Protein backbone atom coordinates (compact mmCIF):
# COMPACT_ATOMS: atom_id res chain seq x y z
CA UNK A 1 0.00 0.00 0.00
CA UNK A 2 2.88 2.35 0.54
CA UNK A 3 3.78 1.92 -3.11
CA UNK A 4 0.52 3.60 -4.22
CA UNK A 5 1.21 6.55 -1.93
CA UNK A 6 4.51 7.19 -3.69
CA UNK A 7 3.98 9.95 -6.28
CA UNK A 8 6.80 8.65 -8.48
CA UNK A 9 5.10 5.28 -8.89
CA UNK A 10 1.81 7.00 -9.75
CA UNK A 11 3.58 9.09 -12.36
CA UNK A 12 5.16 6.00 -13.98
CA UNK A 13 1.76 4.26 -13.88
CA UNK A 14 0.11 7.28 -15.57
CA UNK A 15 2.70 7.48 -18.36
CA UNK A 16 2.67 3.71 -18.82
CA UNK A 17 -1.12 3.78 -19.18
CA UNK A 18 -0.85 6.60 -21.72
CA UNK A 19 1.69 4.64 -23.79
CA UNK A 20 -0.53 1.52 -23.77
CA UNK A 21 -3.53 3.67 -24.82
CA UNK A 22 -1.60 5.28 -27.70
CA UNK A 23 -0.26 1.93 -28.95
CA UNK A 24 -3.74 0.42 -28.93
CA UNK A 25 -5.08 3.50 -30.77
CA UNK A 26 -2.39 3.12 -33.45
CA UNK A 27 -3.19 -0.59 -33.79
CA UNK A 28 -6.91 0.09 -34.28
CA UNK A 29 -6.21 2.89 -36.79
CA UNK A 30 -3.92 0.73 -38.94
CA UNK A 31 -6.50 -2.06 -39.16
CA UNK A 32 -9.29 0.28 -40.26
CA UNK A 33 -9.95 0.37 -44.03
CA UNK A 34 -10.85 3.61 -45.72
CA UNK A 35 -12.41 2.53 -49.00
CA UNK A 36 -13.52 5.17 -51.43
CA UNK A 37 -16.97 4.75 -52.88
CA UNK A 38 -15.35 3.15 -55.93
CA UNK A 39 -11.91 2.92 -57.50
CA UNK A 40 -12.86 5.34 -60.27
CA UNK A 41 -14.66 7.76 -57.93
CA UNK A 42 -13.42 10.95 -59.60
CA UNK A 43 -14.31 9.79 -63.12
CA UNK A 44 -17.81 8.89 -61.94
CA UNK A 45 -18.21 12.27 -60.27
CA UNK A 46 -17.52 14.02 -63.58
CA UNK A 47 -20.22 11.97 -65.35
CA UNK A 48 -22.74 12.36 -62.51
CA UNK A 49 -24.84 14.91 -64.43
CA UNK A 50 -25.62 12.33 -67.11
CA UNK A 51 -26.66 9.88 -64.37
CA UNK A 52 -29.08 12.50 -63.00
CA UNK A 53 -30.55 12.90 -66.50
CA UNK A 54 -30.89 9.12 -66.84
CA UNK A 55 -32.75 9.04 -63.52
CA UNK A 56 -35.14 11.73 -64.73
CA UNK A 57 -35.73 9.77 -67.93
CA UNK A 58 -36.53 6.65 -65.88
CA UNK A 59 -39.06 8.55 -63.75
CA UNK A 60 -40.72 10.03 -66.85
CA UNK A 61 -41.52 6.62 -68.38
CA UNK A 62 -45.19 5.72 -68.68
CA UNK A 63 -44.33 2.19 -67.64
CA UNK A 64 -41.29 2.48 -65.31
CA UNK A 65 -38.92 -0.21 -64.14
CA UNK A 66 -40.29 -1.91 -61.04
CA UNK A 67 -38.65 -4.31 -58.61
CA UNK A 68 -39.79 -6.38 -55.69
CA UNK A 69 -37.93 -8.37 -53.05
CA UNK A 70 -39.09 -11.84 -52.11
CA UNK A 71 -36.78 -13.16 -49.44
CA UNK A 72 -33.35 -12.82 -51.01
CA UNK A 73 -34.56 -12.78 -54.61
CA UNK A 74 -34.86 -9.50 -56.46
CA UNK A 75 -37.41 -9.49 -59.28
CA UNK A 76 -36.89 -6.77 -61.91
CA UNK A 77 -39.73 -5.96 -64.32
CA UNK A 78 -38.63 -3.81 -67.25
CA UNK A 79 -41.07 -1.87 -69.46
CA UNK A 80 -42.43 -3.85 -72.38
CA UNK A 81 -40.58 -2.96 -75.55
CA UNK A 82 -39.58 -4.52 -78.83
CA UNK A 83 -35.93 -4.72 -77.77
CA UNK A 84 -34.44 -6.49 -74.78
CA UNK A 85 -32.95 -4.18 -72.14
CA UNK A 86 -29.16 -3.99 -71.83
CA UNK A 87 -27.15 -2.78 -68.87
CA UNK A 88 -26.03 -3.79 -65.42
CA UNK A 89 -27.24 -4.09 -61.87
CA UNK A 90 -24.71 -3.10 -59.21
CA UNK A 91 -25.10 -4.40 -55.70
CA UNK A 92 -23.16 -1.82 -53.68
CA UNK A 93 -22.04 -2.25 -50.05
CA UNK A 94 -20.85 1.05 -48.56
CA UNK A 95 -18.99 -0.54 -45.67
CA UNK A 96 -16.86 -2.92 -47.76
CA UNK A 97 -15.99 -2.41 -51.43
CA UNK A 98 -14.82 -6.03 -51.74
CA UNK A 99 -18.44 -7.21 -51.41
CA UNK A 100 -19.74 -5.16 -54.37
CA UNK A 101 -21.14 -7.18 -57.27
CA UNK A 102 -22.01 -6.22 -60.84
CA UNK A 103 -24.62 -8.37 -62.59
CA UNK A 104 -25.41 -7.98 -66.31
CA UNK A 105 -29.04 -7.47 -67.20
CA UNK A 106 -30.48 -10.47 -69.00
CA UNK A 107 -34.26 -10.12 -68.95
CA UNK A 108 -36.50 -12.72 -70.56
CA UNK A 109 -38.97 -12.04 -73.39
CA UNK A 110 -41.49 -10.66 -70.87
CA UNK A 111 -38.93 -8.14 -69.60
CA UNK A 112 -38.47 -9.92 -66.25
CA UNK A 113 -35.20 -10.77 -64.57
CA UNK A 114 -34.82 -12.66 -61.32
CA UNK A 115 -31.59 -12.15 -59.34
CA UNK A 116 -30.69 -14.44 -56.45
CA UNK A 117 -28.82 -12.81 -53.57
CA UNK A 118 -28.70 -15.82 -51.26
CA UNK A 119 -24.93 -15.45 -50.83
CA UNK A 120 -25.04 -11.72 -50.02
CA UNK A 121 -24.03 -10.62 -46.54
CA UNK A 122 -26.83 -9.60 -44.19
CA UNK A 123 -27.35 -5.84 -43.97
CA UNK A 124 -28.16 -2.79 -46.03
CA UNK A 125 -27.19 -2.64 -49.70
CA UNK A 126 -27.76 -0.15 -52.48
CA UNK A 127 -28.94 -1.49 -55.81
CA UNK A 128 -28.00 0.64 -58.81
CA UNK A 129 -29.60 -0.29 -62.12
CA UNK A 130 -28.18 1.30 -65.26
CA UNK A 131 -30.11 0.11 -68.30
CA UNK A 132 -30.85 0.94 -71.90
CA UNK A 133 -33.83 0.30 -74.19
CA UNK A 134 -34.01 1.44 -77.82
CA UNK A 135 -30.78 3.43 -77.49
CA UNK A 136 -32.01 5.51 -74.54
CA UNK A 137 -30.30 5.15 -71.17
CA UNK A 138 -32.03 5.02 -67.77
CA UNK A 139 -30.90 4.80 -64.16
CA UNK A 140 -32.66 3.64 -61.00
CA UNK A 141 -31.38 3.06 -57.49
CA UNK A 142 -32.79 2.04 -54.13
CA UNK A 143 -31.70 0.64 -50.78
CA UNK A 144 -32.50 -2.96 -49.86
CA UNK A 145 -31.97 -4.79 -46.60
CA UNK A 146 -31.11 -8.50 -46.57
CA UNK A 147 -31.97 -10.45 -43.44
Image (cartoon, rainbow, N blue to C red):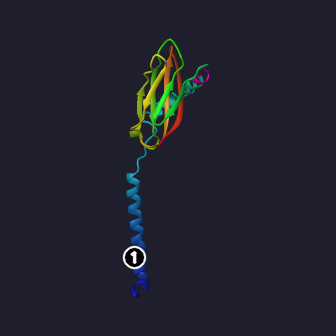
* Mark 1, residue position: 12
Q: State which quarter of the image contains the N terminus.
A: bottom left
Q: Nearer the viewer, residue 2 or 147?
A: 147
Q: Nearer the viewer, residue 11 or 3?
A: 3
Q: Nearer the viewer, residue 22 or 90?
A: 90
Q: Element at badge 1?
A: helix
Q: Is residue 33 above or below residue 44?
A: below
Q: Position of residue 138 (x, y in %)?
A: 53, 22
In this picture, residue 57 sits left or right of residue 43: right
Examine the residues drawn in magenta and state their main secondary structure.
helix
Q: Residue at x 42, y 35 (%)?
A: 117
Q: Is residue 62 above or below residue 3?
A: above
Q: Could you say which quadrant of the image residue 105 lies in? A: top left
Tell me the magenta residue range.
57-61
Give the crowd class for mark 1: few <14, some 14-19, many >=20 residues within 10 Å: few
Q: Residue at x 42, y 77 (%)?
A: 11
In this picture, residue 1 sits left or right of residue 81: left
Q: Is residue 49 a member of the stretch shown in magenta?
A: no
Q: Could you say which quadrant of the image residue 35 lies in? A: top left
Q: Position of residue 128 (x, y in %)?
A: 49, 31
Q: Residue at x 59, y 20 (%)?
A: 63
Amino acid sequence: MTLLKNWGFRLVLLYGGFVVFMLSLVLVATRNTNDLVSDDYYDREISYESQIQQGRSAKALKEPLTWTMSGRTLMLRFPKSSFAPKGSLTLYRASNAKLDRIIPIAADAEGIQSVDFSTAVIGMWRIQIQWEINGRQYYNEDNVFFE
